[in-house]
Amino acid sequence: MLDINQKKLFIFDMDGTIYLDNMIFERALDLFSLIRKKGADYVFLTNNSSKSRKDYLNKLNFMGVDVDLENIFSSTLMTIHYLKQHYPDKLFFVLGTNAMVEEMKEAGLNVLTNYNESVDAVVIGYDTELNYQKLVDASKLINLNKPYIATHPDLVCPVKDGYVPDCGALIELFFAATKRRPTIIGKPHPRNIEFILQNMQISKENAVVIGDRLYTDIKMGIDANLDTILVLSGETKKEDLKSASIKPTLVIDHISKLYQMLKI
Ligand SMILES: [Mg+2]
């Protein structure tokens, strides 16, 4: 039985979980301050690599969320960590937004955004600034059998009036063109949880994952042996749960419910 009041770290997804577009959900701010009042803490983990962690910090602070850069985790941050571990001092071709490229450069990685035969690996993200030349350059390098890495697998990104193609859709495009699939870094891989727990010095039993997607947020939590809470305020609908093989520890309609469940 999940005892939410025993938890020391709450790992929140962002889009569809704590806000939609620029609208923070009701009771979210109260929930965050209650968590801190209880002596626990919270972090945010997003797969969306189109924006930098600083962009998320600004967005969250603007919404009134009390958070520091150290409490924001992203698939770009995880990719940087992965590349430094597996390909130290190598040269990377990156298909991604300017924000993603800059974040990688600031972290000390050697990054190119144009075709160059001497690059050691290809990295793709959620590129909302995509053009055809980038597709050409990436395809040529993937075809040269360079190590190929993608920040996250999400096929679509939710927006106010529907869905738009995300990094996972690009993975499918490149598969059609090159017959290769990348190593995927972000959610649902449990490495994201291990990284956060290590950074925050928290054990698995004391942490919980809260998200709106079964096949990324919840699957990651289950694979990392954490308790998981699915919120129905985003992508997953109640009827999806019946046929799903991924079973969260708890399902709630909205994070305001979590606020009600927490006791001082
Ligand atoms: Mg989400």
Image: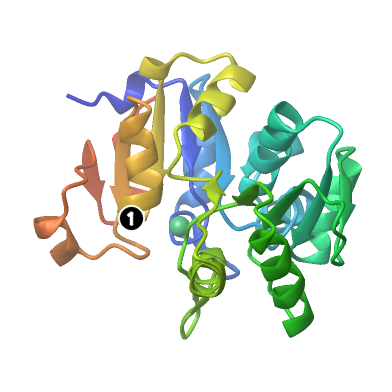
Residue at point 69%, 63% (across, down): 50
Measuring from the top left, give residue 263's x and y in whole percent.
35, 27
Image height check: is 207 above or below 250?
Answer: above
Q: Which picture quadrant has residue 94?
A: bottom right
Q: Which color scheme did the rendering employ for the protein? A: rainbow
Measuring from the top left, give residue 87's x and y in whole percent.
75, 33
Residue at point 55%, 52% (across, down): 182
Image height check: is 226 above or below 105?
Answer: above
Q: Of residues 87 and 254, which is closer to you in this image?
A: 87
Res 160 seen here: yes
Res 259 seen here: no
Label 1 crowding class (10 Å Cα cut-off): few <14, some 14-19, many 20+? many
Amino acid type of the residue that numbered disc 1 sits on in the rendered structure? His
Q: Which picture quadrant has residue 86?
A: top right
181 sits to left or right of 219: right
Q: Secondary structure at mark 1?
A: loop
156 sits to left or right of 62: left
Q: How many marks?
A: 1
Measuring from the top left, give residue 119's x and y in whole percent.
83, 51
